[in-house]
Amino acid sequence: MHSRWDPHSAPVHPLEQAAYGARLLGSDPSLVLHGGGNTSVKTTATDVTGEDIEVLYVKGSGYDLASIPPEGFTPLRMARLRELLIVPRLTDPQMVNELRCARLDAAAPDPSVEALLHALLPFPAVQHSHADVIVTLTNLADGEQRIREVFGDEVVVVPYVMPGFDLAATVADCWPQQSHAGTVGLVLLNHGLFTVGADTRQAYQRHIELIDRAERYLAEHTAAAAGPPAPQDLPSIPAVELAELRQRISAAAGFPMIVSRHTGPTVASFVARPDLAAVATRGPATPDHIIRTKLKPQLGVDVDGYRQQYAEYFDRNATRRAALDRSELTALDPAPRVLLDPRLGMLTVGRQAKDADIAADIYHHTIDIITAGEALGGYRALDESHLFDVEYWDLEQAKLRRAGTPPMFAGQVALVTGAASGIGRACAAALLAAGAAVMGLDLADSVTETFDAAGYLGAQVDVTDPVAVDAALLTGVGRFGGLDLVVVSAGIFAASAPIAELDAGDWRRTMSVNVDSVANLFRAVHPLLVRSPVGGRVAVIASKNVPAPGPGAAAYSASKAALTQLSRVAALEWAPDGIRVNLVHPDAVFDTGLWNPELLAERAGRYGMSVQDYKRRNLLRTEVSSDLVAAAVVRLCSDEFAATTGAQLPIDGGSDRVV
Ligand code: ZN
C-alpha cells in the first residue's frame, strides 16, 4: 500500500487537514467501507468568551469518510470529555447525551460513538479503519500473536470489546500499560486499527505504513495457498427462477426487496469451495458489517429454513439479554441479506438497490478476508453473542433509522419502455423518486445514461425485437431480482396523412411499435409479474385519440385503440393473478419526442392560433405536461388504486368529445 498524501494539496489548517486525511482513508475500500471508520484532530479554538479552549473535532454521524467536509467534524470540549472519562460507568443513551452536550456548536452533527476513545489517546490526530488486512489477521485463532509478529510492540493490542463507553474504558486501562515512546497505534482484535500522530499527516502515514507491512506479511504467508485460477463468470439462470426466489425472500422480510445477482470470478471461486458451508457461516469480518449482511449468509435456496434459524438465533440471544440487563428487544426482519449457492453465485438483498450494493461490496471484501484467513490456519469471527449485541445495539439501529421511512415503492422494480424521453422518462423519474428500481428501455442509446442512480438500469432496445426485449429483461432481473410494475410508453406517431394517401409502410410500422411490441412485452413480463411479492401492476400510455380520434391520424388512432383493447383483455385475464392493468389517455403533451417547435408552430398555424393558445386547446385551458401524466401513472400503480383495474383515465385538460 502506498501513501496518497500529496504535500502540495494537503491543507495546513488542522481541521482542514483532518478532513483531507479522512477522505484519503475513506476513499480506499480496502480500508473503510460505507460509513465505517472515524478520525479526529485535537486543536484549540476561541469560544464566545474570548477564551482559548481545547477542542476535539471528531467525525460526525451520518458523514462518510470518503467525502467528509470540515463541517462534518463535530467540535467537542476536551475538558468535558476528560471528566466523562473518569466516570465509572455510562449507559449508551447517557454517553450519547453527554457527548451531545459537550458540543461547541449545538447545530453540529451527533459525534461518533468512539469520541471518548479518540479523546483519551494522547496525540493530536487519530485515524481509525476496518482495514481488510487487519481484520484478516485478527479473525484468526492466534490473531494477537500474528499482530505481534507483524508489528512487534509498536501497537497496543486490545481484545474485542463492544464499541462505545466500554471500549473507551478498556483502552484507558490498556494504553498506559502497553504504550511507550515508539507506540504508533492500537489494534482492536476482530475490529480494526487506530493510528496516532502529531498531526493528521503523521497518523495517516503511520496507518499506511502499518497496513503495508501487514499486506506484505499476508502475501508471504498466503502465497503457497493460492488456489487454481478463477473460473469464468457463472452462466445465466432463467429470470423466472430469480423472481420466484425474490418473492420468497420478500415474503420472509414482510416487504418487497431488491435482489442483485453477482457471478464474477471471485464469487464463482468462493461458491465452488467444497467447504463453503463451513467457512461462510462463521460471521462477519468486523461487527458493524452485521447490520448490512446479517450474522450469516443463506446457503442455497431454503428461505424458510433461514427464517427459522434467524428466529431461533433471536430468541436465544434475546432471552440472554433479558436475563442480563432486562433488554426488551424487537426482532428485525428474518430475511437474508446475502445468499450463496454454487449455481446462483451470490445474491445480495436490500430494501433498495443501494442497500443490496452495500451488502455486495462488504461481502466481496469478506470473501477475500475469509479466503486469506483460511490460508493462514482458519478464519474465525467473534462469538455469536457479541455480534448479536452489535446487531441489536440501539446506536447501530439508529444508523438505519436515520434513513427514515422507506419511500412508497421501496423494494419494487419497474420496467419503463420509451424511458429516454417524454412521458416514459417522466414516469421513470417519478418511479425512481418514489423509491422504485427502474429498468429503462429505449431505442435511443442515451437511455443507458438517462439517470445516474443505483436504482436505474437502462438498455438500448428496439421494443419490436422480442429477442432483445427478453435479453434486457434477463439482465434487469439479474440486477434487481424481479418485476412488479410495467409502464408502456414507447410509441410512434407517423406523418399525418388522410386514409386515401396512407403509406402502407407507415401503417405497418405504427402497428408494429404501438401494438405488436406490447403484445410481445405482455407475454414476456406476465410470468415475472405473477411472481411480484406485492402484486403486479401495468400502466399503459394510450391516447385521447382512442375515445376521440382525429382526422389524418388513422394509423396512430387505430394502433392506440388496438393497444387499449389488448390492455383491457390483459386486465380481464390477469385479475386472478392479482395483476392490475390500467390505461391513461393523454392529449396534447407537447414536451415529448413526438413534437418539435416547427411541428408545433405548423399545427398552431393550421388552427389560426398562437402556440401558447394551441397548447391549451382544452376545456380547462391548461397545459398537459409529461410530469402530470407521470404523476397519474404513479398514483394508478399505488395502493390507493388497489381496487381499480381495466380503467381508462383521460389526462387531456378536458375534452368535449370525451367527457
Ligand atoms: Zn470501528
Image: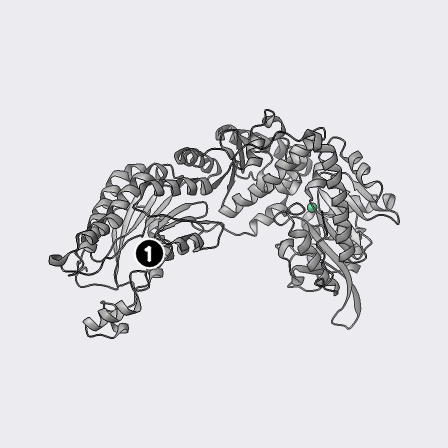
- View extreme (left): residue: 500
Q: Residue type at mark 1? A: Ala
Residue 467: percent from the left, percent from the top? 34, 40
Residue at figure coordinates x 76%, y 52% from the top left? 205
Q: Position of residue 458 (x, y in %)?
A: 42, 50
* 250 or 233, nearer to the observer: 233
- To which quarter of the image does residue 423 belong? bottom left
For residue 328, say whether it is visible.
no
Which quadrant is the C terminus positioned in? bottom left
Up-down relation of residue 337 to residue 5 (above or below) = above
Name, please, the residue furthest toward the top: 274
Q: Which residue is mark 1?
A: 632
Expressed as whole percent of the image width and height from the top left, the position of residue 443 reads 35, 52
Asked where in the image residue 61 lies, by quadrant, the reply is bottom right
Q: Position of residue 606 (x, y in %)?
A: 19, 71
* Residue placed most toward the observer, 28 or 588: 28
Q: Residue drawn 57% across and 31% down?
A: 269
Task: Give the camera-side residue of 646 and 624.
Answer: 624
Q: Which type of secondary structure does the marked residue at label 1 adopt?
A: helix
